[in-house]
Amino acid sequence: MVLDKSIKVATYELPLAEELPAPASCGEDQSGDGRTSERPLSQALLAQNVSWFCQLRWLVIAILVGYGILAFFPGLIRYFGLRSPGMWPFVTAGILTASNLVFLYFARRAASSKAGAGQPEGTQPAGTASPEKAVPRRHLRMLPSTITMVNLWGQIIADLLVLTAVVYFVGSMETSIAFAYLFHIVVSCVFFHRRWSLIVTFMAIGMFAACIVAEYVLKILPPMSLFAEVPLDQNEPSVLIVLALNFFLTIAIWIAVWYLASHLSSVVRQRDFELAETNRRLVAAQEERSRHMLVTTHQLKAPFAAIYSNAQLLERGYCGSVPDEAMQIIQRISARCRRLTAEIQEMLQLANLSSTSQDALVRTRIVSSDLLLWCMSQVDPIARERGVTFKTDIRPVALVGAEDHFKMLLINLLSNAVVYSHKNGLVHIGCRREPNGEAVLTIADNGIGIALDKLPHIFEEHYRTKEAVQHNKESSGLGLAIVKHVAERYRIRIRVQSRLGSGTQFELTFPAPQNHSENP
Amino acid sequence: MAYILIVDDDEDFAHTAAVVLCQDGHEVHIELDTGDATQSMQNRHPDLVVLDVMFPENPSAGFELARFMRHKNNNLKDIPILMLTAINTKFPLGFGAKDIDEDWLPVTDFLEKPVDFDLLRQKVTQLLGRADAAN
């Protein structure tokens, strides 16, 4: 071998196949320090939580206003031994209303930014996706997820400040209002990962401690309470010790609640992440399998297409005249090539159907009339060739399933009806909706028919009746096996009525869509 | 008669199609990969391109050549393209004539392999006639 030193040595190392992470076992320590549990919630879930948080705040504002209105009923206040609230409930409600409007504005802005960021990837046919369609837009100054996260932090900090004011006015140690901080601690455990929720917990402790110190230790703020009479004399040392004990007990309870809530939240988030990851991989595997199936189809069909083309050259006299005996052989080669091509396709379809998991199916709403008309257009060339005409009575009914599968099902039944019809035959196609929402499709021919004893076998793979073989040699016997697989997958009931020599009718009953309003 | 470029990695099939089209009086040239086809088209503009989809080095090279001709090269954008492939609409990721689209599948017409020669000749005549009328 002559070495050309101008050519650089190229090296490539085959990367190892990516493997699914082993799911954590039940006994495993799941302290929440693992990376998956540290992941924040998805943007959609965070945005949903932001809105929910804002809605809940309106309730708090209503309660504050309601409490403030009590000031207009002094008799009622005296009856319950309360102190007149004054203006603070209205002031805090006003601050909360203003801040809530700001938070809602930013929540909507984040939602509209997300909508403006374009369609998610994968909405176009896979496998042939054009790279130019997948270019991300870069015109957004701040990502929706960042706006949502800033919004959430803003809400929590503003809430803690307002809550500290409310705690002070209601009675920081005289009442149990301090436990209202627990709401924000638990919510932060759900929204954020552990470290961030711990920061929220410390912020709550800090604000509560500041309130207590200002009120009881430094006495900068006058003691406040919901009640008209303060039961404890705050100047007594023993009372101060009780207050201090109460304070530390409250903080200890908060930390315990934070630990439990953040731990449980981490576990749930880790499980969620594992589920989402497994689902993503299943979908990717399904797409990869479909791609593989497509390439396999191409690789298997292409050689037969070439053989068929060469046989046609001889058959049509492009290479000069051929003796009659040789011509018969060439015609057999052509016929066998056509049949093999169809068989390869059907075998792959069947393999694809059998191995596709129920979860991986993308179910859409399909209108029966559109589907039937499309399938009829596919079978129309064979029907014309055989002089078979279609007679239709089709009402539009909603079907739910994978469109490709329903096409497979109907094309097989329609082509059978055409192929096994007599010359110039008639195929009736009907579709109606039953009162219970089920769709009933009928395909009836007046062709060769099937004998009673053979009917139970017609859905078996490669089964063909003697009459069918005599009528049409070019069939794989897989068409009805495909029909059976699709029917089983979508719980479609099939009823076959036939009379030998007179014709066959297939009646398909599709289950009603779960949401009846989907019907057109 | 017209100058037709067949772009297909299957030499057997390309040869048979060429024999049929030559018989009709057309001048036919075969290229076995899309890179050479692009070069060939720059040297001499065909009146029609008969294009396969899947090539050994790139399963969507046919799509990419069609998009290049339609969107990135002004000199080639008006040449009619007849796409010929063994893939059809019966598979989840399959496609057919109904999927012809200016962005995604910018071809003029579509035929599935194995193709009937009469149908191929008919389509070629039709596409060349349409191109003549447009010119």
Image (spheres, rainbow, N blue to C red):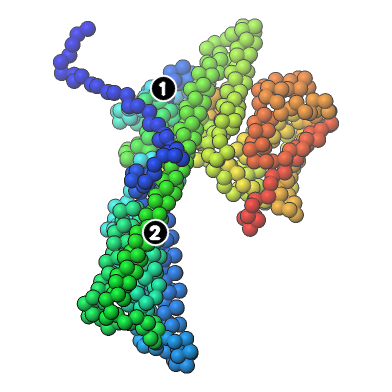
Residue for badge 2? A257
Residue closest to the far front: A238
Q: Is residue B42 above or below residue A130?
A: above
Q: Residue furthest bottom?
A: A75
Q: Residue at x 57, y 38 (%)?
A: A358
Say which residue appears at 34% left-offset and 61% top-offset.
Answer: A252
Assign a secondary structure to mark 2.
Answer: helix
Task: Looking at the picture, tell me which residue is in the foreground, B133 or B16.
Answer: B16
The answer for which chain carries disc 2 is: A
At which x and y percent is residue A417?
73, 33
| Towards the viewer: A90 or A147 | A90
Viewer-closest of A121 and B57: A121
Residue highlighted by disc 1? B9
Residue A219 in the image: state x and y as whole percent. Answer: 23, 80
Residue A65, visible in the rendered structure = yes
Kind of element beneath mark 1: loop
